[in-house]
Amino acid sequence: MKIISWNVRGLGSRNKRRMVKDFLKTENPDVVMIQETKKEICDRRFVGSVWTARNKDWVALPTSGASGGILIIWDSKNLRREEVVIGAFSVSVKFSLDGCGPLWISAVYGPNSPSLRKDFWVELFDIYGLTYPLWRTLEIGGVGFQGNGWEGYKFMRRLQYVKAKLKEWNKFSFGELKEKKKSILNDLANFDAIEQKGGLNPDLLDSLFTEEEISKAIFQLDRDKAPGPDGFTIAVFQECWDVIKEDLVRVFAEFHRSGIINQSTNASFIVLIPKKSLSKRISDFRPISLITSLYKIIAKVLSGRLRGVLHETIHYTQGAFVQGRQILDAVLIANEIVDERRRSGEEGVVFKIDFEKAYDHVKWDFLDHVLEKKGFSPRWRKWMSGCLSSVSYAILVNGSAKGWVKASRGLRQGDPLSPFLFTLVADVLSRMIMRAKERNMMEGFRTLKSLLLVFGHISGLKVNLNKSSIFGINLDQALLSRLTEMLDCKASGWPILYLGLPLGGNPKACGSWDPVGLGKAKGSFSEVGCCVQTEDNRGFGFGEYFLEESRSSREMVMEETGKEFGSGRFVVGDQPLGIQYPRLFRVVVDKNISISSVLGPSRPFLWNLNFRRNLTDSEIEDLEDLMRSIDDLYLSPSVPDARLWPLSSSGLFSVKSFFLALSQSSGSPQNFPSKFVWNSQVPFKVKSFVWLVAHKKVNTNDMLQVRRPYKALSPDICILCMKHGESANHLFLHCSLTIGLWHRLFQLAEMDWVPPRSIYDMMFIKFKGFGNSKRGIVLWQAASIALIRVVWWERNARIF
């Protein structure tokens, strides 16, 4: 009879059951006793997955918690079961055999808990009494039984004991972490439910103003912006903060209580800024408001609070002025939608809406209604009303204020609150369109036109249909013309400018880049920018912001871009002269004049610099220094200014030259021995590893100290020589063990050598150890790379 007893330590894994089944199929036993099944139910399907014999029977003891469980399976064709005894820690089966007496087989799995071991011994005694006098003691010849065991085993048992005690200590000190986590998640869910039910949290908006909050707002403002009616710039508040902070805190405390801003504090000067050159009509100018510094500080603090909660009330499709969102995402999404519609061949329309003087026409009562519906508190609405209703304007004519006017609607350009309040108003239009779409009311363009007119009537934002445009995608021109007549707008072609960036164009077409160039109006005293913009200067700000997203490449372009000076109309030098000579810049009459305008008509050139007063001695010294610096400048008045790319012989930009410049600036080797590595006849993963070694990218101890100090060994220990610190050069070349291997390799090649300085140099030197033939080169590459790989394996084997 063949009996197998096996502690499998769990049969939950399918792979483990397959392994047990294959083993039993090979051994073909009569009885199998399996301990620690960790199964509560052992049905026919489960037993069949362990033993595939056709004639079988079994009996099982279910698991106790996460451990235990006994299963006895036998060949029912050869063994007949007479009796079964199932205890707490054992299973005993009595079999009858032909021609023999009864046979008892017991499978036992003892408890781990010391408190149950007494019961376990009692059960063993009962089994002994059940089978007495059938127990026999088997003598194992030549092997003495001892209880001390292997030292490693005892050590692991001690670790398990410590682990159990640590779990008890953790539970006693910190409690049930899973229950705590569940409780915290429930609390967070309750907070979200309360916020959704009760609107915005007033504590975030209505709390008392603190000194730190006011100070942060002041130092975030531009210190040199034009002053308002009070005549003070923000620089005064920044420089004198320690002196005036107590007075400002009292001002904010009064505003928090009353919500009132007096008319003198909220007075504004209106200044007309031309939208384009040669402006003639009033519509060609954009009005901006110069507000007092005190109100600017108050509005900055309020806008900071509003920014922190705006994302909770503005729909996720709106990206402008909302914290955590990128306005440029709208450009990306719009381009993807237009491109996808074109590729699919489906017809579509893009409608670009223009609001007529959007900020100026916002109705205050509508804004207050929006704030109320969005859950803003009465106190906050009172503050907004105080900021808006106390506004008065005076128009600056030749530097003098003329005619004070009391405002009744609109938001001011230059007010820090205006962009956020306008975003709240514009969000209403977005939600109206989405609500109409949800109710299937957006069929037809007449509905869209009616919706825009209704929104303009209730909000004050009048849609300027004459300036609005419609763009067709895969659309017949006749149908596009009918749509323009229906909407009273104009039809335009692709590409268009959306948020200052191109939309709908083909970037691969050369014609798409015709209207793009470097900013003009760059003279001798003006700042030279690196902003790509359209020729009519539209979208300057967004173009610059877009380039800021890749600052490192932008700086690289500026460093490597040269200039060829022609007439000197636009650019001179690597730095604006206004920055090089600030004292001269302050007294020059026209600060935007170009070089060609101050340059004399013939050689030798005379510089007709026009100053508004006589120069002081220090300014004369600056002027002499300026003249010396530009005397050697070669100018060609008949040739326009241009930028050159010095990294290519043609002077034109190429991606290859730019990539090579970036690679060299990052510190990469200029002449990496690529043939030694990539042409070698070794597996690709080995080539990649050697490339990492050459670039010092492998995780030696010196690198781990920088990247992950908690995983590094002592930096003063090389595991191979136990004498020096471990680095790539030491480990793969200078270590006493490694250099012995290199010596042995060169001896086989019958060569004398001197160890180079670094492993990189080792790869770079063209050793001809096995001859000049192709076979010899391949053998030397493979032997050298194999040595590097073997050293790394040995190092890891000794550590891990």
Image (cartoon, grey):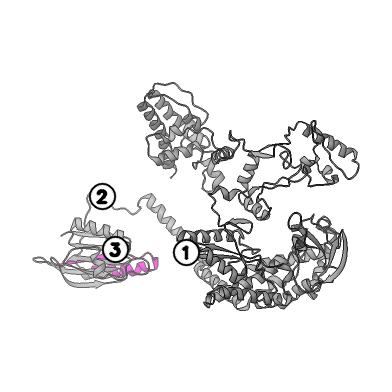
Residue extending farthest to the front is 478
Residue depicted at 80% across the width and 47% down the height: 591
* Residue named by callout 1: 346
Q: Nearer the viewer, residue 616 or 773?
A: 616
Amino acid type at mark 1: Glu
Q: Which mark is residue 143?
A: 2
Q: Is residue 101 visible?
A: yes
Total residue callouts: 3
Q: Is residue 173 visible?
A: no
Query: Which quadrant is home to the C terminus?
Result: top left
Q: Nearer the viewer, residue 55 or 515?
A: 515
Q: Looking at the image, tell me whether mark 1 or mark 2 is earlier in sequence order.
A: 2
Between marks 2 and 3, how big is the CA–CA gap? 25 Å
Query: Which quadrant is home to the N terminus?
Result: bottom left
**Quadrant of the image occupied by residue 567:** top right
**Quadrant of the image occupied by residue 147:** bottom left
Q: Is residue 757 above or below residue 424?
A: above
* Residue named by callout 3: 35
Between marks 1 and 3, how big is the CA–CA gap? 68 Å
Determine the secondary structure under disc 2. Answer: loop
Q: Nearer the viewer, residue 722 or 606?
A: 606
Q: Which residues are magenta?
A: 102-128
Q: Is residue 291 above or below residue 778?
A: below
